[in-house]
């Protein structure tokens, strides 16, 4: 049987297809539409999923949506009424949309499905709850027979944080914290205050934090957020305004810190760095506080996590290092896109009561998106008159790539196999480089990615060498770049952040054989089993999906080399193609 999970109409729309409870295809809509955090109906993503399995909507038993819009509407109404007359402009702006469109979610979903089904019949539509979708996305793909579950985000219908316990095919709730008391919104408030884009720039604040000192940590704990013995927390709503058109904070918020909110074009000062460090430290405190509560209530030795805050790899690293749980597994698509996976799994296991098969690689390395054949790539290259070398096998390609490119301070676009599901590039749609090069971080940030110089890059490392190069235990898994740890080797400046940390992707041959083979070749040539891995895109652009998108990015930046499956392209060999796109300004601010 086939089950189709969907998330859409808020941000990070996605579609996920299950076959007999196993995930066979998944993709975010932004990769096809080229609109970052696209919230529209995921028509392209659905089309991909169906095409991947060579089926139609007639073959789908159920379509499952990742939350309950009526409950969310109830929360919005109650919030506006309780804060009136504050938030009037926001109310007047959002209510017409809800009353005309969003309150009729089921009709909107069916209208979208009708276009895909060409007017024929389509399957019944079911609705999960937002945090249940997160919990299911964290537990069912995990390698644990049973585990504690912790979900932390901005807000779903009412819940902003929730704890559960999972065993075999069942998930049971333990507790939840409700809006407006939200760690995700707390973090986003400071994101906006520091001049970054909310729901997009949170990772910038995380990257900025090591440049400062947490000197405002106690002020924040004393005035803004209170932790209680039962594991809960509360925000001081005197300082927060989640219905305001002017930001998520009140005038009292700025007065507390004696500084106005930073505008995006204003230079980042030491105050901003110290504030980022302080907020990150408080966030880590709250995550540990919640984790302690779920540990006491569940008695479980392993923890799984999802929700937008679960993408805070620094907090994840602190939690893992604390030893509170033996192992921690984080859903790689922890945001709303992963809700499409979770709601489909919740329907399959909780509604239909199907048994669960525990697997160490249920999510297939999260390599669940489109792939392109050699013939398709060759056609695109020849049609646009690119010069290339075709290799009959990847071993020969890796030897030349390592010897003549990666070992010579060249930046390489690496396009291989199925596209990743989730916000991280994991070696299939990646830009890679030599982690030993002292100038590689600046080259990639400024000349390739067109982004702020303070933002760090992540390393990929062969699993068998991870403990030698990083403060990492062999039994821990990190295939999805979701934990930060300390770097042991001082000869890796390009991936070592200012505080000595690195956001680690440990490469297992079974999970990602192609990138493992490249790292093995690099280790044989240089003695180093580590490379830089960053997403194949420029600032504000979704990660590339197709060969044509990869070629455009390659030709519009200072990237030196491009690998498309078995084809290797050198920038110096290419004709000067005329382009009307100024790549650094083609996309909105990220």
Image (cartoon, helix red, strand yellow):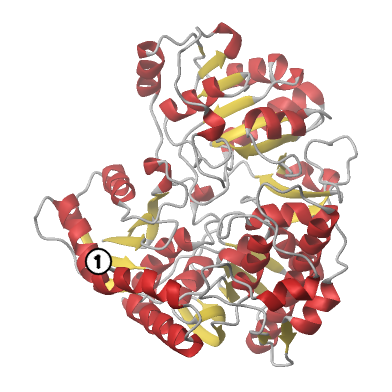
Tell me if 90 is positioned left or right of 589 in this view. Answer: left
Tell me if 278 is positioned left or right of 417 in this view. Answer: right
> Can the viewer see residue 474 in this picture?
no
- The front one of 411 and 35 is 35
Residue 282: x %, y % from top left? 77, 72
Tell me if 193 is positioned left or right of 156 in this view. Answer: right
Residue 121 to residue 560: above or below: below
Residue 126: x %, y % from top left? 28, 73
**Residue at 42%, 62% in the rendered image:** 341
Q: What is the crowding at mark 1: few (fewer than 14 residues within 10 Å), some, or many (at least 20)?
A: many
- The front one of 488 and 443 is 443
User: Label 1's element?
Assistant: strand
**Residue at 72%, 57% in the rendered image:** 206
Residue 345 to residue 227: above or below: above
> Can the viewer see residue 491 in this picture?
yes
Quarter of the image for residue 229 reads bottom right
Residue 237 to residue 585: above or below: below
Residue 217: x %, y % from top left? 83, 73
The residue beneath circle 1 is 62
Quarter of the image for residue 517 reads top right
Residue 316: x %, y % from top left? 71, 64
Quadrant, the N terminus: bottom left
**Residue at 58%, 13% in the rendered image:** 570
Q: Residue furthest right?
A: 490
How many labels were placed on the picture?
1
Q: Residue furthest left?
A: 120
- The front one of 331 and 449 is 449
């Amino acid at each position: 049987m086939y089950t189709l999970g969907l998330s859409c109409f808020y941000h990070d729309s996605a579609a996920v297809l299950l076959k007999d409870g196993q995930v066979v295809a998944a993709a975010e809509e932004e990769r096809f539409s080229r609109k970052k955090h696209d919230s529209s109906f995921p028509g392209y993503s659905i089309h991909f999923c169906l095409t991947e399995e060579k089926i139609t909507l007639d073959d789908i038993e159920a379509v499952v949506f990742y939350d309950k819009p009526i409950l969310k509407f109830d929360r919005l109404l109650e919030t506006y009424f309780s804060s009136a007359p504050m938030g009037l402009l926001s109310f007047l702006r959002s209510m017409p949309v809800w009353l005309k469109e969003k309150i009729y979610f089921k009709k909107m979903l069916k209208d979208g499905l009708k276009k895909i089904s060409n007017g024929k019949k389509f399957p019944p539509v079911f609705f999960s709850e937002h945090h249940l979708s997160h919990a299911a996305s964290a537990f069912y793909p995990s390698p644990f027979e049973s585990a504690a579950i912790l979900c932390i985000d901005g807000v779903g219908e009412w819940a902003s944080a929730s704890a559960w316990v999972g065993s075999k095919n069942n998930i049971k709730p333990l507790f939840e914290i409700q809006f407006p008391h939200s760690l995700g919104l707390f973090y986003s408030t400071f994101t906006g205050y520091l001049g970054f884009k909310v729901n997009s720039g949170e990772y910038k604040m995380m990257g900025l934090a090591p440049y400062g000192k947490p000197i405002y940590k106690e002020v924040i704990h004393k005035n803004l957020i209170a932790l209680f013995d039962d594991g809960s927390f509360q925000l001081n709503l005197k300082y927060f305004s989640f219905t305001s058109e002017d930001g998520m904070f009140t005038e009292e918020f700025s007065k507390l810190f004696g500084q106005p909110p930073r505008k995006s074009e204003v230079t980042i000062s030491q105050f901003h760095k110290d504030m980022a460090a302080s907020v990150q430290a408080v966030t880590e405190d709250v995550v540990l506080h919640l984790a302690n509560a779920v540990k006491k209530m569940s008695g479980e030795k392993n923890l799984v996590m999802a929700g937008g805050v679960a993408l805070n790899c620094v907090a994840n690293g602190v939690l893992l290092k604390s030893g509170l749980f033996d192992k921690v597994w984080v859903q790689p698509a922890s945001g709303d896109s992963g809700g499409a996976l979770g709601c489909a799994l919740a329907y399959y296991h909780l509604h239909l009561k199907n048994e669960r098969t525990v697997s160490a690689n249920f999510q297939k390395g999260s390599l669940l998106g489109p792939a392109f054949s050699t013939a398709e790539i060759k056609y695109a290259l020849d049609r646009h008159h690119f010069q290339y070398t075709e290799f009959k096998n990847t071993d020969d390609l890796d030897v030349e790539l390592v010897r003549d490119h990666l070992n010579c301070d060249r930046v390489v676009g690496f396009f291989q196999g199925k596209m990743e599901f989730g916000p991280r590039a994991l070696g299939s749609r990646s830009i890679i480089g030599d982690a030993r090069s002292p100038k590689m971080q600046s080259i990639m940030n400024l000349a390739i990615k067109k982004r702020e110089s303070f933002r760090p890059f992540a390393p990929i490392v062969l699993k068998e060498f991870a403990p030698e190069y990083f403060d990492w235990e062999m039994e821990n898994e990190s295939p999805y770049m979701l934990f930060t740890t300390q770097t042991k080797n001082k000869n890796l400046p390009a991936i070592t952040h200012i505080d000595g940390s690195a956001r680690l992707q440990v490469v297992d041959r079974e999970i990602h054989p192609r990138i493992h083979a490249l790292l093995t070749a690099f280790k044989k040539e240089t003695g180093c089993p580590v490379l830089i891995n960053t997403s194949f895109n420029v600032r504000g652009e979704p990660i590339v999906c197709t060969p044509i998108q990869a070629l455009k990015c390659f030709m519009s930046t200072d990237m030196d080399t491009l690998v498309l499956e078995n084809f290797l392209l050198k920038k110096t060999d290419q004709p000067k193609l005329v382009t009307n796109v100024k790549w650094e300004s083609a996309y909105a601010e990220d």
